[in-house]
Amino acid sequence: MGVLNVTPDSFSDGGDWYDPARALDHALAMVEAGADLVDVGGESTRPGAAAVSPDEELRRVIPVIEALSAACPVPVSVDTSAPEVMRAAAGAGAQLVNDVRALQRPGALEAVAETGLAACLMHMRGEPGTMQQAPHYPNGVVAEVSAFLSGRLQASATAGIPAERLLVDPGFGFGKTLDDNLALLAGLGELLGLGRPLLVGLSRKSMIGALLDLPVEERLHGSVAAALVAVERGARIVRVHDVAATVQALAVWNAVSEVTAAEETT
Ligand code: 7PJ
């Protein structure tokens, strides 16, 4: 999943793709590099980010989603928590909602159920403005994230969203310390018990910066390593900024795992 931020303030590429024509070019370049999905977001959720009104989100993302749905050969995802943006994005051709608030906003479950969109349910502790202020998981971060996602899958089912349309995501960096993030990555396999495909986003995140003591523009190699670890532990979709590098690393990993799988069946 290639990231396309159409925001003036995202932490790693804020402002780069704000203009719809440039956004389309960048999306097509990511597809060319091997992206199977493009995630369009108009609300920055980096730590400390201010909230964006649904009107402003609509103004940012709908023209880009329309252009991409017409010209881009892979499904388009909309990164939003606002039900009105979900509905408009579905009308503009989006196929997936990527919601960092796991459809908890009033009306979000209904918007997904009624439009037939697929949805990624992500775990976040708190809100972007305050989420990094001393997050704490007394029962263990993997168990608490798993319980939350299980509850959201249940709520989605109750709202009439078929399970086959749902993905789950532990939400790396969203209200988590470095140790929490590492525990989640190490324990990613436990989330497979939820029975839905796992999506993970680690690309350029502060946990990579903290491990390597590097600023956001120098986190490529660490991000690729993190994506490989995630896939090796069961992630099915990785949300990344650097598509070519990630696709190449995964192609090498995949060639080896196919040999391993063939040996295991003989
Ligand atoms: C994630 C996301 C993530 C999902 C962002 C960033 C911050 N959506 N949106 N998972 N992160 N599903 O790109 O680093 O981890 S925004």
Image (spheres, rainbow, N blue to C red):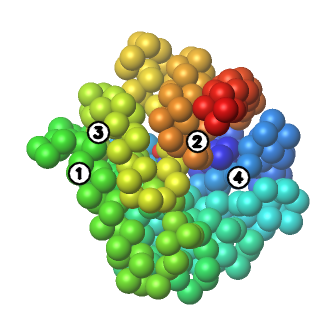
Of labels 4 and 1, the one closer to you: 1
* Cα separation between marks 1 and 3: 12 Å
Give the mark nearer the N terminus: 3 vs 2: 3
> Can you tell me whether the CB of the residue at mark 3 lies under 8 Å from the nearest atom of ligand 1?
no
Instruction: Name the outermost residue toward the top.
Output: 213
Query: Measured from the top left, where is residue 162 in percent x and y?
Result: 52, 78
In the visual, does 166 lie left or right of 130? right
Dot 1 falls on a residue whose secondary structure is helix
- Residue at left offset 86%, top offset 66%: 70
Neighbour tally class for label 3: few under 14, some 14-19, many 20 plus, Cα within 10 Å: many
- Residue denoted by label 4: 37
- Residue denoted by label 1: 144
* Cα separation between marks 1 and 2: 22 Å
Q: How many marks?
A: 4
On the question of residue 73 being in view, the answer is yes
- Residue denoted by label 3: 176
Dot 2 falls on a residue whose secondary structure is strand
Give the mark nearer the N terminus: 4 vs 1: 4
Q: Are marks 4 and 2 in contact (CB under 8 Å)?
A: no
* Amino acid type assigned to the residue bearing label 1 in the image: Glu
- Residue denoted by label 2: 238
Query: Measured from the top left, where is residue 82 in percent x and y?
Result: 48, 71
Query: Measured from the top left, where is residue 45 in percent x and y?
Result: 44, 49
Give the mark nearer the N terminus: 1 vs 3: 1
* Amino acid type assigned to the residue bearing label 3 in the image: Lys
* Cα separation between marks 3 and 2: 19 Å
* Cα separation between marks 4 and 1: 29 Å
* Cα separation between marks 4 and 2: 10 Å
Q: Are marks 1 and 2 in contact (CB under 8 Å)?
A: no
* Cα separation between marks 3 and 4: 26 Å
